[in-house]
Image (tube, helix red, strand yellow):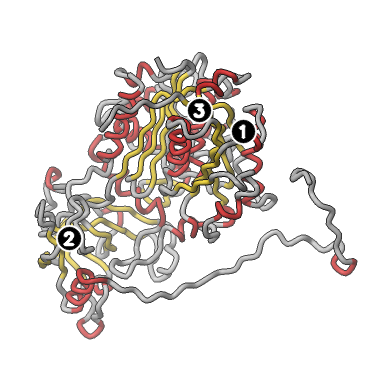
Amino acid sequence: MGETTKRNCAVIGVGQTKYQSTRETSIAGLVREAALAALADADMTFADIDAVVIGKAPDFFEGVMMPELYLAEALGAVGKPMLRVHTAGSVGGSTALVATSLIQSGVHERVLTLGFEKQSESNATWALSLPQPFSVSVNAGAGGYFSPIIRQYMESSGAPDLIGCMVAFKDRQHALKNPHAHVHQHDLTFEAVVDAPMLWDPIRYSETCPSSDGACAMVLGSEAVGDAASKPVAWVHGTSMRSEANNFGGRDEVSPQASRDCADDVFAQAGITDRRAEIDAVEMYVPFSWYEPMWLESLGFAPKGEGWKMVEEGATTHGQGDLPVNCSGGVLSSNPIGASGMIRFAEAALQVRGMAGEHQVEGARKAFGHAYGGGAQFFAMWIVGADKPS
Amino acid sequence: MSADVAPEVSVPDVIAGVEPVQSVRTPIRLDYTYVPGRSLTAYLKAMKDKRILGGVCPETGQVAVPPRGVSPLAGKVTEELVEVADHGHIMSFCVTHIPLPGREDLKPPFVAAWVRPEGASIGFIGLITGIEPDECRIGMRVRAVWKPDEELEESAENIPSWEPTGEPDVPENEVRV
């Protein structure tokens, strides 16, 4: 294999809709709103864009097959290359990475990328519970799938029972500082989180993500485009994707090999050796509260079995800890599934651009964006920085 | 024409003032013929004889249940099928407190568990009965509850549930290996 040189890529603009359940806006309206916001942030119009890369979760969620075809007009993509990416729940992250690769390879100068979902016109739990002829149908949705894995983590780590509730409470507090977030529970108490009904024991209702509509878009540009930008940009320091089968003998479901490999790769690319010390803000994919300590360990921010201690100590709380996680409120506060990974990546970019508003981590220079999908088997990660990669 | 300018819309007088329809619920149903392939055909046929078959990976020796014709890790065709036991242990589980679409017969709370039959390398999903949900444990030994012989079909539904055997649990360090 010959030597490969990646060109620099920068996040020039970010645009997000309000995340909510809405009957006022169509899918085309959602994606266009996010795209126009990202273009405005980048001081560009559709005419400046070379190509569009779009992602969403499985088509049968909304029952609209290949929606990217009819969305081309809303996204100014007619007559331009348009790609659809599909990696289940991690799709928002991998969509951003495919777009990034189009810049890094020198194919394009300016790429618009976005993810969306319209859960108000969908039934994700049903879509994820399709009967299969070779197995019994007793598993209800994503919660039913991830609950046994969380139970494994709780048993093997010896974490106190209420760590998950602490994560949920923390993320909902964070969301109050993010105007785009779906869930704004101003009067929420920790006791209310704990007292919420169990859905998929050990997962409470309060520890699950909402069903949101929304879209998130980014304008990515080459080094020249980044240098010429009028606002601060986020430089890409590392990108990685990995996947693995979802059931094989000896599989580590709690911390999948693909997750660990993906993290090792992206941190190595960014030249980061002390992950917890060198990263200033983390946006990770936490659709069920317990995934925060689980990913903290899998991503190497905490030793195995000790991620929950960071939660307990407040290390991941904005304005309090040394490794704030999901200052935007995270997936627990907004979950337009196909956009959720993109939001993590975009929020990481906003942090290092110093443009995260009330949920800004002061002085953030390097941030980590993360998405996972399927049976915790597809992973996408990036690291962005305020400075160009050295 | 600028795409940002919405075209003027006029409605006939007869529907003026009628509340706009914002969504219409239109359930769709798809019936399809499933072609199981060689391995799953053997698996489903064996189910009718109250036997559980797994596919052996020629490279790792791992036994996958149900056999999908290819080993998940090595990606090798699994020509060899072996019978695994109709008893095993709970690898992990979920106590479900919400109704499952299409399974209105299941009254919450019910336990859905990853059960690994003895002789298999991976688990599959099954319903646990014969025990209160809060007494269910990782490592608990269970056996298949088969449908009555006259109701057996070429179907995974022949094992509607698994129930505890009452034997000592599988040791913690053997639950996942």
Quadrant of image for the N terminus of chain A: top left
Which residue position is annotated with label 3? A327
Residue B77 marker: 2
Q: Which residue type does callout 2 highlight? A: Val
- Chain of the residue displaying label 2: B
In the drawing, does residue A327 fall left or right of residue A378?
right
Q: Secondary structure at mark 1?
A: helix
Nearer to us in this view, B46 or A32: A32
- Chain of the residue displaying label 1: A
Disc 1 with disc 3 on a shared chain: yes
Quadrant of image for the C terminus of chain A: top left
Alpha carbon distance from label 2 to label 1: 48 Å
Nearer to us in this view, A362 or A113: A113
Q: Secondary structure at mark 2?
A: loop
Q: Residue furthest bottom?
A: B150
Residue A38 marker: 1
Vertical side of A284 occupied by A310: above or below: above
For disc 1, the neighbor class at 10 Å (few under 14, some 14 to 19, many from 20) is many
Q: Residue at x 54, y 44 (%)?
A: A81
Q: Is residue A117 visible?
A: yes
Vertical side of B120 occupied by A18: above or below: above
**Which image quarter: residue A194?**
top left
Q: Which residue type does callout 1 highlight? A: Ala
Return the x and y of residue A126 as percentages of the image width and height.
46, 61
Q: Which residue type does callout 3 highlight? A: Cys
Nearer to us in this view, A230 or A318: A230
For disc 2, the neighbor class at 10 Å (few under 14, some 14 to 19, many from 20) is some
Counting the numbered discs, the total is 3
In the drawing, does residue B67 fall left or right of residue A376?
left
Vertical side of A238 occupied by A113: above or below: below
Disc 2 with disc 1 on a shared chain: no
